[in-house]
Amino acid sequence: MSSSVCPWWLGYALASPLRRVLQDPAAILYPYVRRAMTVLEPGPGMGFFTIELAWLVGSEGRVVAIDVQPKMLQALRERASRAGLAERVETRLGEQDRLGTDVLAGKVDFALAFAMVHELPDQQRFFEEIHATLKPGAKLLVAEPRMHVNAAKLEGTKRLAEKAGFRVVGEPKVRWSRTVLLERA
């Protein structure tokens, strides 16, 4: 595993209810997620956003959460179960260099990449894989932590996404983050 991947034990702090004061998942996700959607969340950690995504998609939708750390996924499954949302959340163990999303090709309505793109060894491949999963016109919200990603790095991320077939459609404000909203062209 890459040394740049957030350690699993830090996931407890990242999933803390106190974080909601600074980054409210409902406020961040509500503009993009609707009932019955299929949502892809690579790098969900212990599910800070996953639980809200599961509420938003409703019983007709599903959230596919892919992480490279089994302990993160186990904690996510436990949290989803306690919230009564286990049937809406599908967890998958990803590989270090690929998501393994071939079976989702053209089926995803929305994807969320929160504070994880900067950890990837091959961002170009990541954007190509996400692009292949999305339906035409579907959106990908990328939010990177300001403490790890400066404005120049975010510009580089945008260029890689555009090269993979996305177009930039906005830069929503998310506290402590550099954010870009992308659309599958």
Image: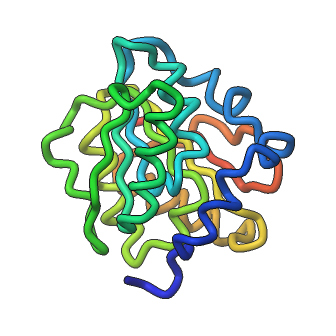
Residue 185 seen in the figure = no
Number of marks? 0
Q: Is residue 140 left or right of residue 151?
A: left
Q: Measuring 38% from the left and 59% from the top, which residue is drawn there? A: 67
Residue 156 visible somewhere in the drawing: yes
Which residue is at 41% across, 52% downward? 42
The C terminus, quarter of image: top left
Q: Position of residue 75 (x, y in %)?
A: 47, 54
Image quarter of the N terminus: bottom left
Indicate how the structure is coloured in the image.
rainbow
| The residue positioned farthest toward the bottom in the image shown | 3
99 w.r.t. 1: above or below: above
Q: Residue furthest left?
A: 103
The residue at the point 74 percent across, 66 percent down is 151
Where is residue 64, by image quadrant? top left
State the residue at coordinates (55%, 42%): 141
Q: Position of residue 51 (x, y in %)?
A: 54, 34
Q: Is residue 27 left or right of residue 67?
A: right
In the displayed structure, 83 sits above or below 23; it is: above
Q: Position of residue 138 (x, y in %)?
A: 40, 29
Res. 36 image quadrant: top left
Q: Residue furthest front?
A: 82
Pick the front one: 112 or 127: 112
Q: Position of residue 139 (x, y in %)?
A: 47, 33
Using the image as rendered, state which of residue 30 and residue 150 is in the foreground.
30
